[in-house]
Image: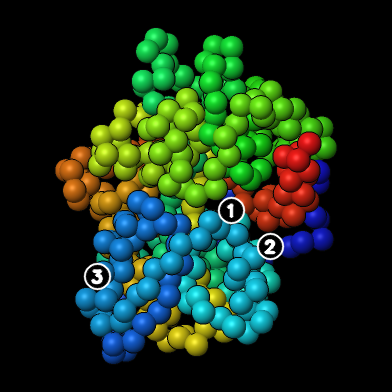
Amino acid sequence: MKKNQAKRRSPRYGVVGWTAGAVLACLTGLPGVTMGAESITVVSWGGSYARAWEKAILEPFTAETGVEVRLESFNGGLAQVRAQVETGNVHWDIVDLEFADLARGCDEGLFEFVDIDQLPPAPDGTLARVDYFDGTYSDCGGGGIFYSTIYAYNTKSFPGEKPSTIEDYFDLGKFPGRRGMRRTPGVNLEFALMADGVPPGEVYEVLDTPEGLDRAFRKLDTIKDHIVWWEAGAQPPQMLADQEVVMSTAYNGRIFNAQVIENQPLVIVWDGQVLDYGQIAIVTGTPNMELSREFLQYASRVESMAAIGRYIAYSPTRHSGVDLFTTHAETGVEMRPHMPSAPENLKRALRNDWEWWSDNAEEVHERFSAWLNR
């Protein structure tokens, strides 16, 4: 599986060559114009993440501008956005996206252009272009957080030895029981290769070959009969709490909230975490363009991005946001150690290669669907 060499990425996506180590090294707003009592629709990921958005951004935005924000949930992807744009029936204004989908949708014209130089600077005046971590902004995005896909377990499921490595997730002999896994090839293939002995820094090089892709699916074969598939981010914490599964891949922030708010005995295994980031985008053809641009400006303030980290363990994708980490708003828990970008959590992390997925997603998703149906 070779990347489509005919595709060229323009400089608008910034520098994409940062690594977990680079993030570790680095980790050492403009006011909107009030538009009146109007409304926009923001689409995000639901569950505890949606609640964090409401508290950190939506409610303060409405208080400042008088603009009502209707929050809807989805499970990612571009299908719904594409259908709205192609039919001219656009009823979503702002969408919160994984970066690979943002980049692909931007190339397809599904999202409006956003000038990075018009986004709010850092509190000290540093331009947004400089303040964003390398590779974390695009021509169509604003805002942005680091998040991670990890796996977690319920301590009640393992009274003796506990899982501690990505290899343990695939070890049915040592740790028998059902596994939760998102119904998508993304991250699952990376986890499979790391569990099969591929160092994090070589995962995409291996995955970029037919033999490497075969190897990843063979590793998934070893646990396929023991997988309980999930699609919404709220599902893994519930499956773990109910002991429907003994381990599950999950978004780190969802597990954090289950730990600190619901007092669930869940543990995150950071080994092999796949570090990722997303942004929000304005849907092309929205009838609420000015309000949408106002919201994107507000959500792109460093203070707004950092505020999300007071309600869920996701960190801003801007350098100036690192010093704004504080405590969890509801429990007082210190947030820094729970962030995916915390130094101790990056020891064997893999940065998601959005460009690889943007180039290969269609083919890999077709193969994954065929694999599921075998």
Give amino acid for label 2.
Arg
- According to the picture, the residue beneath numbered tag 1 turns out to be 16
Mark 2 → mark 3, Cα distance in angstroms: 36 Å
Residue 96: tell me if it is visible.
yes
Q: Nearer the viewer, residue 339 or 288?
A: 288
**Does dot 1 land on a helix, a strand or a loop?**
loop
Q: Which residue is depicted at the point 31% across and 43% down?
A: 257
Q: Are marks 1 and 2 in contact (CB under 8 Å)?
A: yes
Vertical side of 288 occupied by 172: above or below: above
Give amino acid for label 1.
Val
Q: Locate residue 209, reporting x and y percent.
A: 80, 38
**Does dot 2 land on a helix, a strand or a loop?**
loop
Q: Is residue 22 left or right of residue 30?
A: right
Q: Is residue 310 left or right of residue 344?
A: left
Residue 323: tell me if it is visible.
no
Mark 1 → mark 3, Cα distance in angstroms: 32 Å
Q: Is residue 160 left or right of residue 20?
A: left
Earlier in the chain: of badge 1 and badge 3, it is 1
Mark 1 → mark 2, Cα distance in angstroms: 10 Å
Q: Which residue is depicted at the point 71% across and 27% down?
A: 221
Q: Locate residue 163, reporting x and y percent.
A: 46, 19
Number of residue marks: 3
Mark carried by residue 138: none
State the image quarter where residue 81 is shown.
bottom right
Q: Nearer the viewer, residue 104 or 50?
A: 50
Mark carried by residue 9: 2
Q: Nearer the viewer, residue 202 or 258?
A: 258
Mark carried by residue 60: 3
Vertical side of 190 occupied by 131: above or below: below
Q: Which residue is depicted at the point 76% across and 40% down?
A: 373
Earlier in the chain: of badge 1 and badge 2, it is 2
